[in-house]
Structure formats: C-alpha cells, structure tokens
Image: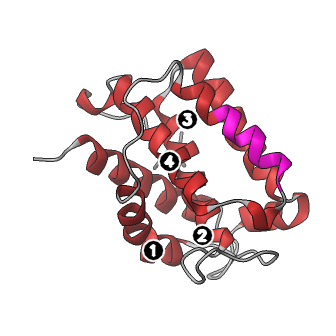
C-alpha cells in the first residue's frame, strides 16, 4: 500500500523528469540553469512564490508539486549531495540524470527530519514566508534543513487538501501537445 509521502514523492519525480525534458539545453545543463546563472537564486525563489500565489487563487495540485520540485532542485544546486553544508558560492547545474540519481537520498534525508507540529495556521503562508526569507539571504547561508522543512510543508499542504485520495492527479507532465 502506498502512503501519502511515497505518492507525493512519485509525483515530484514525475515533475522533474518531464520538466527536465521540457527545459533541456544539453545533457549537462537545463535552460533553468541559464536563468539561474543570469538572474540569480531569487529568480527561482520568485518563481516558487508565483506558484504559491497561483495555488492560493486556483488550488491546483500541480503548483504544490512544482514548488516541492524546485525545493529539491535548490538542494541540488547548493551541492548538499556533494559536500556537507553545500557550496558557499558555486552552483551545480542540473539535468534529469542528476535529479534522478540523488532524489532518493534527498527523500531519505527529508524523512530523518524530526516531525514538526501537526497543526499550522497556514501551510502555504509558511512556504511563502520562508521563500521570501531565503531571498534575502546570501546563497551560501541557505541551510539544507530549511529546504527540508519547505519540502515537508509542501507535503503537508498536499495531504491536507486531500490530493492523495484523488484517482488522478493534476500534474504538469506530458502536456507538450496541449
């Protein structure tokens, strides 16, 4: 039997696999890496906040999945899978192979984080407030644990909204012909 965390992780994986195809630039780098290199970390954090606003207005499951996917990409870009504490200045380029290779490690580390309190005034506000806070921080200050909590908040919001129980999911995948 699949639990809600496993299902959420599966949907996030679907998101980064399809997103990697959609935004592929080369075998080593995606167009989102070029945007990150050009506009900095706040481009990605701002994009994630955009999905928070959109979720607040439309409550589409895909927006929570995208935020969680970008949290994972931030973890990769900071290099936490290479070096404890991540890189202070360097940024890791991403691709589907890299994302797929380290996702289980990311999920295992998220699962080791102590359970936060079960009630929240607003999971979405927690996510958005943390993104705004991270935008003010230098790149090398962003902590791995902050990214884990962001991901956990996405899981909690997804679960609280009952998406786990839906037969089909509103994913932003395989829509190239739409």
Mark 3 vs mark 4, CA separation in Å: 13 Å
N-term mark: 2 or 1: 2
Q: Is residue 82 above or below residue 108?
A: below
Q: Is residue 110 visible?
A: yes
N-term mark: 3 or 2: 3
User: CB atoms at circles 2 and 1 under 8 Å apart?
Assistant: yes
The quadrant where residue 77 appears: bottom right
Q: Secondary structure at mark 1?
A: helix
Residue that badge 2 annotates: 76
The quadrant where residue 160 appears: top left
Q: Position of residue 27 (x, y in %)?
A: 62, 82
Of residue 81 and residue 59, the one placed in the foreground of this image is 81
The residue mark sitting in front, 3 or 1, is 1
Q: Which mark is residue 102?
A: 1
Q: Residue at x 90, y 63 (%)?
A: 38
Residue that badge 3 annotates: 63
User: CB atoms at circles 3 and 4 under 8 Å apart?
Assistant: no
Mark 2 vs mark 1, CA separation in Å: 8 Å
């Amino acid at each position: 039997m699949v639990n809600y965390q496993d299902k959420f992780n599966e949907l996030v994986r679907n998101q980064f696999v399809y997103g990697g195809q959609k935004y592929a630039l080369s075998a080593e780098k995606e167009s989102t890496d070029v945007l990150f290199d050009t506009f900095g970390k706040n481009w990605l954090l701002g994009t994630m906040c955009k999905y928070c606003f959109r979720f607040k207005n439309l409550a589409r499951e895909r927006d929570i999945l995208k935020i969680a996917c970008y949290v994972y990409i931030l973890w990769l870009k900071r290099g936490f899978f290479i070096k404890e504490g991540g890189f202070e200045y360097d940024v890791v380029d991403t691709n589907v192979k890299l994302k797929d290779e380290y996702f289980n490690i990311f999920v295992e580390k998220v699962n080791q984080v102590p359970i936060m309190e079960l009630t929240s005034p607003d999971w979405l506000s927690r996510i958005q407030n943390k993104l705004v806070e991270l935008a003010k921080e230098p790149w090398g200050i962003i902590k791995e644990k902050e990214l884990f909590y962001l991901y956990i908040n996405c899981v909690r919001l997804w679960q609280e909204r009952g998406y786990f129980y839906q037969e089909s999911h509103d994913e932003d995948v395989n829509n190239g012909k739409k």
